[in-house]
Image (spheres, rainbow, N blue to C red):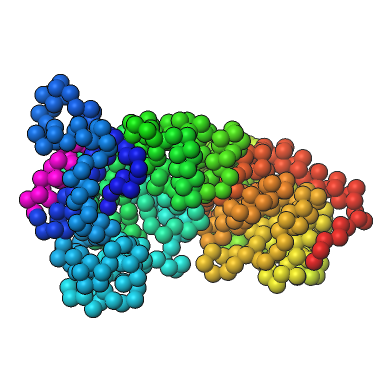
Amino acid sequence: MSTIANHTVLPRCQAALSDIYYTMAGCYRYLGRGSMTRLYEQMAIQAGMLKTIMPSPDIINEQSIPALLEKDLSEFSATGTLRKYSRLLQRVPAALLDTLEVKGIAATLVRKLYEELNITSEEELKTAILSGALKRVRGFSNAKIDLLKRNLKLYKSLGSRLLLWDAILQGNEILRVIKGIPEVDDVSLTGSLRRGAETVGDIDMVVSVRIESRADFIRHLLQLPQIQYIVSTGWRRVSVVLYNDTQLDIRLTDEKSYGASLIYYTGSLRHVAILTERAEKRGYLFTPMGLFNGITGVWVAGDTEGGIFKELELAYVPPELREGGREIYRAGRNMLPQLVTFSDIRGDMRIRTDYEKGGESLNTIARYAINAFPHYEYLVVADQLPFEMYHQQFAEIDRVNSELGYPFLKKGIVVEMTAEAIAVPEKLLREAEWVTAIINEHEPFRYRQLFISACDHPLINCIANPTGRIIGARESSTQNWDQLFKRAVKTGTALEVNAQPQHLDLSDRLIKGAAVSGVKIVINSCAQLCSQYDYMQMGVIMARRGWCGKADILNTGNWENVQRFKQQHLMTYKNDSHEKDSIDL
């Protein structure tokens, strides 16, 4: 239950002393001693309200500190722990104390876990649940076992994970509501949602609430209409299930520990492990409560993320990069890229209209985009149509642009790559301002041939949703992507990031590989309705996870830059029209 009990050097701050007292309250709850439980819960609140943990007559007199707390301050400020705390931990299975916070799980049931099943660790508890052994213990109903599964995150499956876009919408909505609770000082989304993972299991957040206000915060939180039922409530964590069956896990912290908790609970686990190791090598201790001097246990930093990174001689690491790769190494050498942002995007280069079934009119999308995204300079209309219809659409684009007073809408064509010739006449392709190819072949060898053909075509500028994946339904095409990226670079062919929630194609891993190879990336919403133009933000998140800067993304440039890219592609074809590189198939 305690986050500090196993460290050789222990943090010495108000939050750490509160943590000790709260853990002691849990121990006494397990032992069935209600009066002692209530005493140490009050002690935890008193400790959290201290201005300092250093005992002095002024502090003691000013804050009217209880005699028991006054007695403990000297020992805690000197050692970072309490002897009575250490002795109490030896009397209980400490790993099971969190189970007391699960709704409906009384101390008598927790004692049965230890006494009847000999469970002493969280892993043993998970095994007992999954094996069905817990069902044989009297008192553990199916409903209570389900709550335990929720608390231990054992209910998850691929099908239960949210697509990133759905998680963003749900997360931002509940974030807005929680910000309105009076006791909240600060709040942020964390976990895989904050890192921008393509699917998200739960919505995680860190909430800063003063220790004396936590009971009121929890009371107000549990009254929210968005909450379907409670999983667990405790001093440091509250877990509930929302009405859409999404689990919300809240980590509670205070102002002084807010930044440390953000880093710790944003993750990833590997990133935090590497950061912790770096802290130890530099003589620090890193916990969710802050960064502490490794010798004295004195608090050094923790109220902001930036303060911790700075103290560890690191550049700030954006959440999208915190996956435990090379980001800490690069941050220590000021080698992190300046990541692309949504405001850098100058236009969306594949949007669909009512010329395809279900879309909206050219006039509607033009005026919507100009008002909703004032930093956009162009939209490429890219419907996949019978070639006879493009003349009509191009004429309407000219008319709408004339009404706008400038050429905001650009004429795009989408062609499907097949073994036969492209179904759109070359003359029409030359009239278009941007040509995108799609490949609907999933057999690896044939896909590869079509990819190469698209790159080698002088009038094709970009290949859309290159791997053909559908998240949770269809895997990416199996290819030697490094070789295909080389072909795209040599021919000056851009690759798309399809920002539709179920695609996010290219993936973050392949985006990084493409960018390192020198491929120009185009981020597109592929929107068919005005409400889908915001998908561009997810494409930007994927590009950030792929370590892309502004220079890696073609549509961060103005239209003149896009046209120069087109001309370079055409010149490459003219200069090398008869030479085809051999690629190992």
**Horizontal placement of 498 versus 43: left or right?**
right
**Horizontal placement of 423 versus 545: left or right?**
right
Residue 423 screen position, x and y as percent: 77, 65
Residue 167 screen position, x and y as percent: 42, 55
**Of 437 and 193, the residue lying toward us:** 193
Residue in the image at 46% along x and 47% along y:
273
Query: Which residue sits furthest left?
Result: 35
Q: Quadrant of the C terminus?
A: bottom right
- Judge whether residue 42 is colored magenta: yes
**Of 495 and 383, the residue lying toward us:** 495
Q: Is residue 565 above or below residue 354?
A: above
Magenta range is 34-49
**Of 532 and 163, the residue lying toward us:** 163
Residue in the image at 57% along x and 56% along y:
504
Q: Main secondary structure of the magenta part?
A: helix
**Horizontal placement of 536 versus 93: left or right?**
right
- Judge whether residue 136 is colored magenta: no
